Image (cartoon, helix red, strand yellow):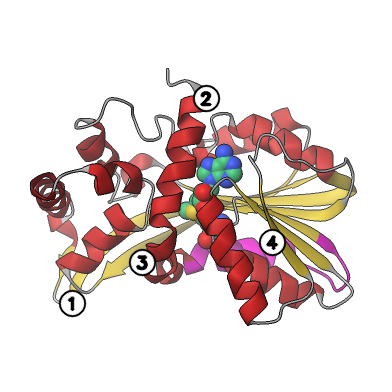
Amino acid sequence: MMEPALQRRVQRYGWDKAAAYYENTWQQQLKPAHDTLFDFANIQQGQKIIDIACGTGLISFRAAAATGSNGFVLGTDISDKMIEIADKTSKEKSVRNIRFERMDAEELKINAEEFDVAICALGLMYAPSPVNALKEMYRVLKKGGICVAAVWGKRDNCGWADIFEIVDKRVSSEVCPMFFNLGNDSVLEKNFELAGFSTGKIKKIQSSLDYGTDEAACAAAFEGGPVALAYFKFPENVQKEVCKEYLASIEKYKTAKGYSVPGEFIISLGIK
Ligand SMILES: C[S@@+](CC[C@H](N)C(=O)[O-])C[C@H]1O[C@@H](n2cnc3c(N)ncnc32)[C@H](O)[C@@H]1O
């Protein structure tokens, strides 16, 4: 079992490395999950929203536009670099109803019952204890508030899943040992319940990660994603080797236009 403190460090500094590549390599591919999460959240004008593991703020800025000038969004993430990029974007775009702060999902530096809506897009899988992260969302929500989280689905339904194994066998500590656990049947609902939420609704969506070239597929897997910390430390020959192995693992998803790699998302809503 990986030490929680080590997992947090791997995540924090790994996403620091990935931050600059993240939007280019993932924004389009995650859109189906983001859209469903956003529909579920059904944000109303004037609401206070917290975005957990907000990354560069892709969902936070959508939430800020939906809640309007009388509402407010707080985006939180464990990576300083992600927060830095999100903050810079808010200044460049003069978005005034948003603030970003570095926080661990399992330890929000926020008073209880402050928010109407808590959202978390593709972040829960990275917390050492997803249930503790959900408990924190529960704590900071007002009574009747809603929490919506999107996670990756079953390992077998995510065609890119071999990247973890390919990297893990070359490093001393695994990147994210329980990554696909929340994608197993009923695990996400169970975690919501354990955190105190009443079940709202849940949806599974099948999607595809489409890449035009080998380079684009490898950039998403290694530069802009969860294994970036290890990848950027590898010497060039090992970087080439892991790319080759990854491309072999997704070879079966080759199309006339590049790759269409299957992916599954699960989106869940709970009520406090
Ligand atoms: C795949 S990105 C998702 C970013 C954003 N929510 C989106 O959908 O574009 C995962 C994010 O989780 C963050 N993260 C990982 N572990 C975390 C933790 N324990 N607490 C808070 N954020 C964490 C990473 O820094 C990264 O920005």
What amino acid is at disc 4? Phe
Some atom of ligand 1 lies within 8 Å of the CB belonging to the residue at label 3? no
Question: Which of the two discs, 1 and 2, sits closer to the camera?
Answer: 2
**Residue contact at pointers 3 and 1, CB within 8 angstroms:** no
Q: Which residue is mark 3?
A: 25
Q: Which residue is mark 4?
A: 40
Is residue 164 found inside the magenta-colored segment of the image?
A: no
Q: Is residue 108 left or right of residue 110?
A: left
SS category of the residue bearing label 4: helix
Q: Which quarter of the rendering shows the N terminus?
A: top left
Q: Which residue is mark 1?
A: 257
Residue 34, placed above or below residue 187 = below
- Nearer the N terminus, badge 2 or badge 4? 2
What amino acid is at disc 3? Thr
Rounded to the nearest angstrom, the CA distance separating label 4 from label 3 is 25 Å
Q: Which residue is mark 2?
A: 4
